[in-house]
Amino acid sequence: SQQGEEDPQALSIQEGENATMNCSYKTSINNLQWYRQNSGRGLVHLILIRSNEREKHSGRLRVTLDTSKKSSSLLITASRAADTASYFCATDDTGNQFYFGTGTSLTVIP
Amino acid sequence: KAGVTQTPRYLIKTRGQQVTLSCSPISGHRSVSWYQQTPGQGLQFLFEYFSETQRNKGNFPGRFSGRQFSNSRSEMNVSTLELGDSALYLCASNTQLNTGELFFGEGSRLTVL
């Protein structure tokens, strides 16, 4: 299975701190994406990084990709209570199928 | 532009029954995929449709089936429900063959008693 794995499974931080979560995957990919899910809701796309990119920014988000280590990290800077959610990485390969990890549950304490 | 719409949002069934879930993708999106989400298991891929054709299928038993109509709306069906089928079923659409950004619906939460 190419399913990714996020690490840590759960993360609790104070508002204003930075949150870092990691994703590892198993085989070659086209793209890697990060999604956010508020409790019991649908997933919302955050950012996509292509396999030939190493770093990408979007607002308070910074994503890195290391294809040699088959890993990615998502950094959320200056976290807010509204960032409390689960975060998933998703990879897609030439087989036109997405593979999601099991998620990191982030709690930001006001 | 309206988002992905899933119906029903919540439903309760008993073991042995069958259920049909519906998903209306964003207008113009021809790819629809389905996922099962259970606590601790993440999102498990069920199947993906493009232009009424099933392109990919996940590792689920034959009790799980789906289809896509000419207007890109999709349905999934689970027959002979088991307790373990209790989950949040998510539908996602995108413009291409399951590449690029996925747009998710709010999900259908199925409880099997």
Image (spheres, coloured by chain):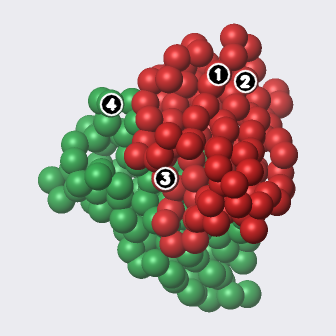
Chain colours: A green, B red
Badge 2 is on which residue? Answer: B73
Q: Is residue B112 visible?
A: yes
Residue on which the image places disc 3: B44
Q: Residues within 10 Å of mark 1 (few under 14, many from 20)?
A: many
Alpha carbon distance from label 1 to label 4: 20 Å
Q: Amino acid at mark 4?
A: Gly
User: Mark 4 highlights which residue?
Assistant: A95
Residue located 61% across and 31% down the image: B66
Q: Amino acid at mark 1?
A: Gln
In contact (CB < 8 Å): disc 2 and disc 1: yes
Out of A48 and A76, give the one closest to the viewer: A48
> In the image, A59: left or right of B22?
left
The residue at which mark 1 appears reads as B68
Quarter of the view holding residue A13: bottom right
Label 4, secondary structure: give it.
loop
- Report whether mark 2 lies on the same chain as mark 3: yes
Say whether marks 3 and 1 touch (CB < 8 Å).
no
Q: Give the amino acid type for the residue marked by disc 3 in the picture.
A: Gln
Q: CA distance from mark 2 to mark 3?
A: 21 Å
